[in-house]
Amino acid sequence: MRARLKDVAERAGVSIKTVSNVVNGHPHVSAVTRARVEAAIAELSYRPNLSARNLRSGRSGVVALAVPDLDNPYFAELATHVISAADRRGWTVLVDQTQGDPGKERLVVGGIRSHLIDGLLFSPLALTHRDLAGREDHTPMVLLGERVGRRAPYDHVGIDNVAAARAATLHLAERGRRRIAALGAQRAPSAATARLRLKGYRQALAACGLAADPSLIAHAPAWHRTGGAEAMAALLGPDAPDAVFCFNDALALGALRTLLSRGYRVPEDVMVMGFDDIEDGRFATPSLSTVSPGKALIAESAVSLLADRLAGATGEPREVRVPHRLTPRGSSPYGEFP
Amino acid sequence: MRARLKDVAERAGVSIKTVSNVVNGHPHVSAVTRARVEAAIAELSYRPNLSARNLRSGRSGVVALAVPDLDNPYFAELATHVISAADRRGWTVLVDQTQGDPGKERLVVGGIRSHLIDGLLFSPLALTHRDLAGREDHTPMVLLGERVGRRAPYDHVGIDNVAAARAATLHLAERGRRRIAALGAQRAPSAATARLRLKGYRQALAACGLAADPSLIAHAPAWHRTGGAEAMAALLGPDAPDAVFCFNDALALGALRTLLSRGYRVPEDVMVMGFDDIEDGRFATPSLSTVSPGKALIAESAVSLLADRLAGATGEPREVRVPHRLTPRGSSPYGEFP
DNA sequence: GGCCCGGTTTACAACGCTGTAACGACTTTC
DNA sequence: GAAAGTCGTTACAGCGTTGTAAACCGGGCC
């Protein structure tokens, strides 16, 4: 059987509480006693029982990260950063996959694991502010990605999607492209990110005096490669675009594949721009231009906001805007084309 | 404050234990009482305190999954399957990233979270059987990937790497290639997977009567895209290979990039074969031929083995070999080339 | 009517830990 | 030399839950 405080105490010839004090690094323990206790701890290879500690203290040292899907490289990369940031604070991360399913998302915010976790980092996909408004669980929560409703009383970390999408579109226009398509529009009421990126795209067109041709807007119900490949196919034809701004990198990689397999040259015939800066894009051929959202900083900010709440901060919900960066690569290069 | 059993009991006018019985679905609770208790539970939106339950029962319902890095698409995809498989059994998954660091790996198997988790699924990278042999923690553990040492007393799930590598190499030889390179060899004593795949490669060459040219074996200290790109560059030159078997898909995608950017045609000049069947490979141009290791089945088997141990199974360590499949795609197609 | 039996409900203790308060021994201060 | 403080250590209670064992209650049987 595993050793308990009691066993260590008996072995060291002190009281249980003294062992507890040593374990927790309390002051007012004499050097001699401390040494004896530490020896006993080592001999029995004692480890604190976290369940008991949690029960007593109400804290578990575990935070949950709920994302749609770790298959998605963006979330996988975000998760590594969150785990690192949490680790730096001595926390462990428990990962929930919601699959973007409203039911599962509701379970997560409803506190399905509430007694196990101290806080929740949640990247919602399907839930609207309505769902969050009625939240009964009181575990601190920080929202990642798009803000869900203007009034949701939760800390939020995200980027300025409108500005980023505008910059990405302008980047294509600056390279002389006139028929710039947008790929990844969505109709669902919860698709806030898609709406904002489309808005930025339209602002950029307007700023350049380019007409907003509705046939250049391609919808994609899900933002993965297959959807990008299909949506790109729908854009091609007699009036094919000369550039396409995809609302994320997965869509862009799918689009790239369709373009190349149909004999289009990238970037010469069609420039491609993504969003997210996932590792794969860097190694595509040609390498994928993209918007880099600073994932490490997003993760760090989110964990930091949560840390404040766990430390008892009660003020107004805070809004963190993490800066983004345009990262031009081979699919939209500077310079001349033949 | 959050409701406890006691609060529900008072509201329903019964004892604490009766509420506990209802919550746990015990028999011998009258329909009337059950209904009253359930109403009270709903009104107070009671949720069991998992810490207390764990303390009492010694079970947490949490299993840990320790992988080198979620950034790596192979592990990200594996993680999604593990999380799903665990979810089906009502378990939650806590993810640890070891970064392939021996120190962190040792912490994980040493039981750093032992009181928090019921079991451990561990995909070792750096640890050898020596490290595992002295394991003191008694949390059930199942090893994923390469077997660490022949005698480690742990259940293990993996694929037949030698056979898979042999099949992949033969596949290239069958398409008429004679100078087939291997990319991803490693010298570290812990690099069991690399050794086995190299062995399969050599067996295939021998079976075809092809000479084993040492200059065709490229080393890569880490199996990511950058390493693949660099190793591929080292293989090129006057005696460039006409096919390359990469020990995983990330290496292959890096190699692909080097080949294309240097003007080689794939598959005409050089065929490329990967290993792992990650999503990215499917969307590369050309799409990447690979070995599919059945990740869903690996995850399911591992969770199932762990479930048996948690249920008290004590027999000999079990060895599960999950079948693999050769998945030819554009980078090594059937048919003729100009 | 008393007794036993089965289903239903309950009191109690314990899981391992830590905050509180109090204790004893020793030092400092007037 | 007595009072006041300081330091190191301890006893105790309680966090919310569940297993155990015992109490309770009504119906069927002798």
Image: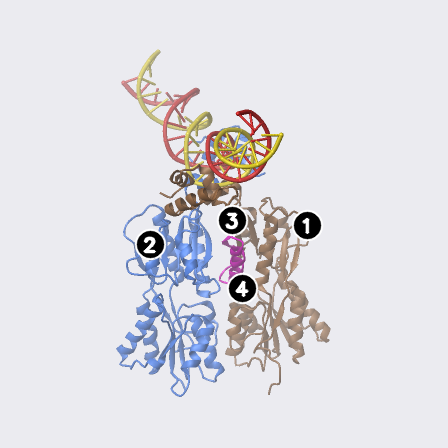
Chain colours: A blue, B brown, C red, D yellow
- Name the secondary structure under disc 4: helix
User: Which amino acid, by three-letter code, is at mark 4?
Assistant: Tyr
User: Which amino acid, by three-letter code, is at mark 1?
Assistant: Glu
Instruction: Report whether mark 2 lies on the same chain as mark 3.
Output: no
Q: Which residue is mark 3?
A: B61
Q: Nearer the viewer, residue A28 or A44?
A: A44
User: Which amino acid, by three-letter code, is at mark 3?
Assistant: Gly
- Marks 3/1 in contact by CB < 8 Å: the verdict is no
- Marks 4/3 in contact by CB < 8 Å: the verdict is no
Q: Which residue is mark 4?
A: B74
The image quadrant where one finds the N terminus of chain B is top left
Q: Picture quarter containing residue A200?
A: bottom left
Tag nearer the camera, 2 or 3:
2
User: Which amino acid, by three-letter code, is at mark 2?
Assistant: Gly
Lower position in the chain sequence, tag 3 or tag 1: 3
Magenta-highlighted residues: B68-97
